[in-house]
Amino acid sequence: MIDLTLSQIREIEKITPTPVHVYSQDEIIKQTLQVNTAFSWNNGFREYYAVKACPTPGIISIMQQLDCGVDCASECELLLAKAMGFTGSQIMFSSNQTLPGEYSLAKQLGAIINLDDIGMIDFIQAECGIPEKICLRFNPGGEITNGNVIMSSPQDSKFGMTLPQVYEAVERCQSLGVKQFALHAFLVSNTTDDSYYPNLAHTLMKLAIDLNKKYGCRIFMLNLSGGIGIPYVPGQKAADLQKIGSEIKKLYDQLLVPSGLGDIAISCELGRYMTGPAGCLLTKAIHLKDTYKHYIGVNACAADLMRPAIYGAYHHITVVGKEAAKATRVYDVVGSLCENNDKFAIDRLLPEVDVGDYIIIHDTGAHGRSMGYNYNGRLRTAELLLCSDGSFKLVRRAETKQDYFATLDVSGLTF
Ligand SMILES: *Cc1c(COP(=O)(O)O)cnc(C)c1O
């Protein structure tokens, strides 16, 4: 979680008005090093940053300098990766319901292509020929439980292949000349349960051993995908990457090494863990309203951060300059959309807020601005990087009215 002082906000406003998404370079470096260190025992380890979480070169390049690759799922994400100089095995292409042309581009870039469905084997073969190295996305079905709490239902998820399909896929791929395989699975989103990754690694290791025995195929990578969560609520337990990494090393030494598979690379595609805590949405209280409830109207809206609106996600909120003040009033913190779900917080206990107060919505560095949209004619915010030297750098300008109107047929209209 990052904070901003009033004097920093004065600096920010010289560059771009609020609302604005702000990211901390130091925090991104810290998260990246935690992941890289946890898996430093594995020679081929690579974190592929899930581009969709924050598709901004000025942010991704911080992780690129620390040896991360990128995980893409669409043509534009691939083009962004290409423009940034990512090539070959630095790119994962984990798409689903893949559009025509996307596999061709991924193959041209030398990306590791992750097939979401057995039907994609013939699809890619027809489009551009299946590459000699391919990744298969496994969905074991069932439910994942954490104690008694069901966190996710892989059986209800649209992603991946069933176990029999994975076996069939290997046979089919081999018959088409595929020489090397990677295995991938993504079962739970935003979990801080330290057993999730080791359990998933265990599942994929056993599958790798079995496939290797049965088909003699070389497995070059096990990709644990995304899903490690962050403590959005203050006081919530954070994931312990060091512990997760060493648990997986134990399994690796117990299972893979004795099976002669001690050269398999481990990889992941974390998005939220990498940049989530490193970002915040800086906004301002512009109206107060008292009806059946107390409302703080801010100049940001769900178009800038839709997680609370679409799945009731918690984002911590602080009032700049009142961090130590007593929380004495229960508010709904709302944006301006003509949609009643445009609420960043419901019944949130906060210090007394005045019009003009700056409000920080925390942990918005992943799946924040990138989910933005233009409903109600709202323009998307700029993105600023708080650099390690304390300066602010604009890494994406705010959208303009011209951007908003650019896709219209405007013949005969003037704006
Ligand atoms: C979204 C996604 C990720 C990143 O998920 P996080 O929860 O942000 O870690 C990784 N891999 C794939 C295939 C995804 O769709």
Image: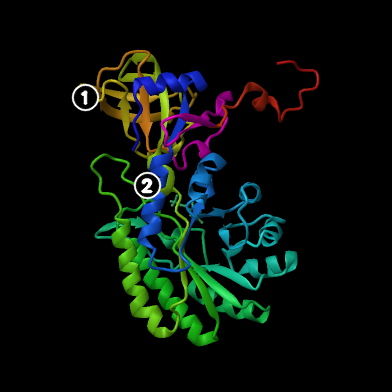
Q: Which residues are magenta?
A: 365-394
Decide: few, some or many residues near mark 2? Use Cα within 10 Å; few <14, some 14-19, many ≥20: some
Decide: few, some or many residues near mark 1? Use Cα within 10 Å; few <14, some 14-19, many ≥20: few
Q: Quadrant of the C terminus?
A: top right
The image quarter containing residue 92 is bottom right
Name the residue: 49% across, 24% down: 337
Q: Look at mark 2 in the image and give the residue it sits on.
A: 30
Q: Look at mark 1 in the image and give the residue it sits on.
A: 324
Label 2 sits on a secondary structure element that is helix
Q: Quadrant of the N terminus?
A: top left
Name the residue: 46% across, 36% down: 306
Q: CA distance from mark 1 to mark 2?
A: 26 Å
The residue lying toward the viewer, choosing from 316 and 301, is 316
For disc 1, does the CB lie below 8 Å from ligand 1? no
Residue 377 is a magenta residue = yes
Classify residue 27 as left or right of residue 49. Answer: left
The residue lying toward the viewer, choosing from 395 and 172, is 395
242 over 81 or under it: above or below: below
Q: Position of residue 2 (x, y in %)?
A: 35, 35
- Name which residue type carries label 2: Lys
- Name which residue type carries label 1: Ala
Name the residue: 34% across, 74% down: 251
